[in-house]
C-alpha cells in the first residue's frame, strides 16, 4: 500500500470510529467527561494509524480493534455499566449492518456491472486499493446516516422511551447482520440469490421494528392516559377529603356554639354576674381560632 492510499485509509477508519463518538454523544452529551476526551481521541488516532497494517495481516484482528475502540468511546461519558453494554452492543449491530448493506451493494456493482472477479472487501484491500477505499467510505456513510436518523428520533422522544426502542430494534438488527453476513460466502453464481434473500430479511426486520415501535407507542399512550386518570382521581380524593374535613370542622363549631348558648342561657336564668366575662372569653376564643386559620 503506497503512502497516499495509506493516509486515506487512516482518515477513512478514523471517521468510521467517530461514528461511535457521535452515537454516544446523542444520548449522553450531558454526562461527558471532557478530561478524558483528549486521551480517547489520541487512542483512536493511534488505532487508525495501526488499522491498515492489521487489515493486511488479519481482518479478524482489525475488526477486534474496531470494536475495542467503539467500546472505549463509551468511557467519555459517566454512565452505568448496564447502559454502556446495551448501547455498545446496539452500536455494534448498527455498524455491522451498515457495513454489510453497503458491502452487498458494492459487491453487486463490482461483480455484475464492472465484472470484477474478486469482490470480497478483504481481498479487495490486497488487489485494488480504490475499491477498498470506496467500500470503507460507503460503510462510514451508511453508519452515519443510520445514526443521524436515530438523532432525529431522539429529538422527539424521551431518552427512557428511546432506550426501549433500542431494545426493540436490537434483535431484528442482529437477524439482519447474520443474514447479510452470508453474502461474504457467495460467489457470482449464488450472489443474486443470497442478495435477494438478504434484502427480504432486511425488509422483514424493518417491518418488525416498525410494528414493535408502533405497539410500544400505543402502550405508552395508554400508560399516559391511565396516569392522567389516576392523577385526576387523586385530586378528586384529595378534594373530597378537604371538603369532609371542612364539614367536620363546621359540625364541631356548631356543636361548641350550641353548648356555649346553653351555658349563657343558664347563666342568665340564674342571674349570674359572670355572664359578661364568659361572653368576652368566647369572643377572644373565636378570634384566636380565626387568626390561626
Image (cartoon, rainbow, N blue to C red):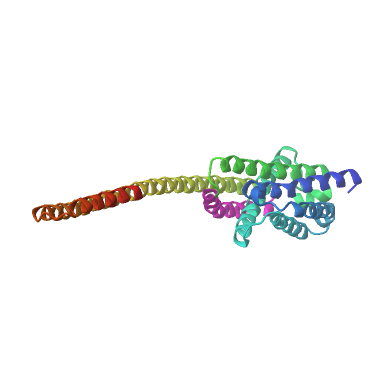
Residue 49, x across and y down, in percent = 84, 52
Q: In the image, 146: left or right of 69?
A: left
Magenta stretch: includes residue 165 = yes
Q: In the image, 8: left or right of 190?
A: right
Residue that sits furthest to the right in the current view: 3
Q: In the image, which residues are magenta?
A: 160-189
Q: In the image, 183: left or right of 127?
A: left
State whether residue 182 appears in this view: no
Give me the residue at 59% from left, 48% from top.
Answer: 198
Q: Quadrant of residue 60?
A: bottom right
Relative height, residue 185 to residue 143 (above, below): below
Residue 137, x across and y down, in percent = 75, 42
Q: In the image, 270: left or right of 38?
A: left
Residue that sits furthest to the top in the current view: 113
Give me the residue at 86% from left, 45% from top.
Answer: 7
Give me the residue at 63% from left, 43% from top.
Answer: 146
How many numbered marks are there?
Answer: 0
Residue closest to the eye, 206 or 92: 92
Amino acid at each position: 500500500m503506497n503512502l497516499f492510499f495509506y493516509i486515506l485509509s487512516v482518515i477513512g477508519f478514523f471517521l468510521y470510529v467517530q461514528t461511535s463518538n457521535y452515537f454516544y454523544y446523542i444520548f449522553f452529551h450531558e454526562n461527558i467527561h471532557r478530561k478524558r476526551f483528549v486521551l480517547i481521541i489520541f487512542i483512536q488516532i493511534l488505532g487508525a494509524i495501526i488499522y491498515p497494517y492489521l487489515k493486511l495481516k488479519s481482518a479478524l484482528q482489525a475488526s477486534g480493534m474496531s470494536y475495542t475502540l467503539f467500546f472505549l468511546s463509551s468511557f467519555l461519558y459517566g454512565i452505568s455499566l448496564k447502559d454502556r453494554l446495551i448501547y455498545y452492543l446496539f452500536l455494534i449491530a448498527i455498524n455491522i449492518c451498515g457495513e454489510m448493506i453497503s458491502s452487498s451493494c458494492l459487491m453487486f456493482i463490482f461483480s455484475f456491472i464492472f465484472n470484477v472477479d474478486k469482490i470480497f472487501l478483504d481481498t479487495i484491500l490486497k488487489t485494488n486499493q480504490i475499491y477498498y477505499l470506496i467500500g470503507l467510505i460507503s460503510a462510514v456513510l451508511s453508519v452515519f446516516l443510520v445514526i443521524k436518523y436515530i438523532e432525529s428520533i431522539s429529538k422527539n422522544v424521551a431518552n427512557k422511551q428511546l432506550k426501549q426502542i433500542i431494545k426493540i430494534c436490537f434483535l431484528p438488527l442482529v437477524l439482519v447482520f447474520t443474514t447479510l453476513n452470508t453474502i461474504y460466502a457467495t460467489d457470482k453464481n449464488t450472489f443474486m440469490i443470497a442478495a435477494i434473500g438478504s434484502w427480504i430479511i432486511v425488509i422483514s426486520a424493518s417491518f418488525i421494528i416498525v410494528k414493535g415501535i408502533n405497539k410500544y407507542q400505543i402502550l405508552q399512550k395508554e400508560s399516559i392516559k391511565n396516569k392522567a386518570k389516576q392523577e385526576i382521581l387523586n385530586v378528586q380524593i384529595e378534594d373530597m377529603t378537604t371538603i369532609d374535613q371542612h364539614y367536620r370542622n363546621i359540625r364541631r363549631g356548631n356543636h361548641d356554639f350550641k353548648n356555649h348558648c346553653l351555658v349563657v342561657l343558664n347563666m342568665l336564668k340564674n342571674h349570674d354576674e359572670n355572664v359578661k366575662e364568659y361572653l368576652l372569653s368566647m369572643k377572644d376564643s373565636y378570634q384566636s381560632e380565626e387568626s390561626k386559620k
